[in-house]
Image: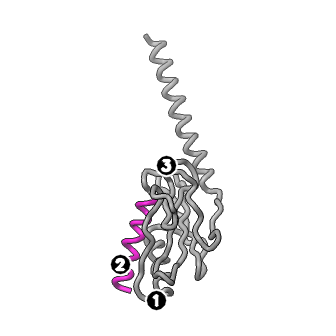
């Protein structure tokens, strides 16, 4: 009986260690920057895994609404920048036609990329948010965009 408990305990300990090491590896791997930027003037396609959302995706599984704005495109671009910072994002690169920001998850510090591009003709800001590693994100990228949308909306109402 003692031997069986010892073996079971050893197996549980080994599986727990493997689990922790796997997440540490993914956390470290997520710190390596992935390709970002526009492709043919649009945001990159989602990679086909459910840890990405994009307002320009033709695939309904990854689709999310772009940010609509009132006022001038310049003001909206500044307001979206502020909304990202309020949401905990770190703006890595910003021009008049593209913005790239990163977010870190709380527990394992996985890095997610957020990209935006303005569509001034339609008064929209297109968005793409994707995890760098793994396949699932428990809806984190979608939730992040909706949180930024709330902050952006607040700026639109008061800005």
Residue matched to label 2: 154
> How many C-alpha atoms fall within 10 Å of the one at disc 3: few (<14), some, or many (≥20)?
few
Identify whether 122 is placed above or below 3: below
Residue matched to label 3: 136
Residue located farthest toward the top when viewing the structure as drawn: 1
- Closer to viewer: mark 1 or mark 2: 1
Which quadrant of the rendered structure holds the N terminus?
A: top left
Q: Is residue 108 left or right of residue 93?
A: left
Is 52 or 7 nearer to us in this picture? 52
Residue 133 within the segment the image draws in magenta: no
- Closer to viewer: mark 2 or mark 3: 3
Which quadrant of the rendered structure holds the C terminus?
A: bottom left
**Residue at image location 65% in from the left, 57% down from the top:** 32
Give the label on residue 72, or none. Answer: 1
Please report the bounds of the magenta region as a residue range. Answer: 141-159
Of callouts 3 and 1, the N-terminal one: 1
Of callouts 1 and 2, the N-terminal one: 1
Q: Position of residue 147 (x, y in %)?
A: 39, 67
Q: Position of residue 23 (x, y in %)?
A: 55, 44
Is 152 or 45 nearer to us in this picture? 45
> How many C-alpha atoms fall within 10 Å of the one at disc 2: few (<14), some, or many (≥20)?
few
């Amino acid at each position: 009986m003692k031997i069986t408990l010892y073996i079971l305990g050893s197996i549980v300990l080994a599986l727990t260690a493997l689990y922790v090491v796997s997440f540490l590896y993914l956390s470290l791997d997520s710190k390596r920057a992935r390709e970002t930027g526009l492709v043919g003037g649009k945001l990159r396609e989602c990679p086909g895994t459910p840890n990405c959302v994009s307002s320009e995706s033709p695939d309904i599984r990854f689709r999310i609404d772009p940010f609509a704005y009132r006022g001038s495109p310049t003001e909206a671009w500044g307001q979206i920048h502020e909304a990202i910072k309020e949401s905990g994002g770190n703006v890595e690169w910003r021009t008049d036609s593209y913005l790239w920001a990163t977010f870190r998850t709380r527990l394992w510090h996985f890095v997610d990329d957020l990209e935006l591009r303005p569509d001034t003709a339609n008064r929209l800001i297109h968005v793409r948010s994707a995890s760098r590693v793994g396949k699932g994100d428990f809806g984190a990228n979608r939730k992040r965009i909706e949180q930024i949308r709330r902050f952006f909306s607040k700026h639109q109402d008061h800005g």
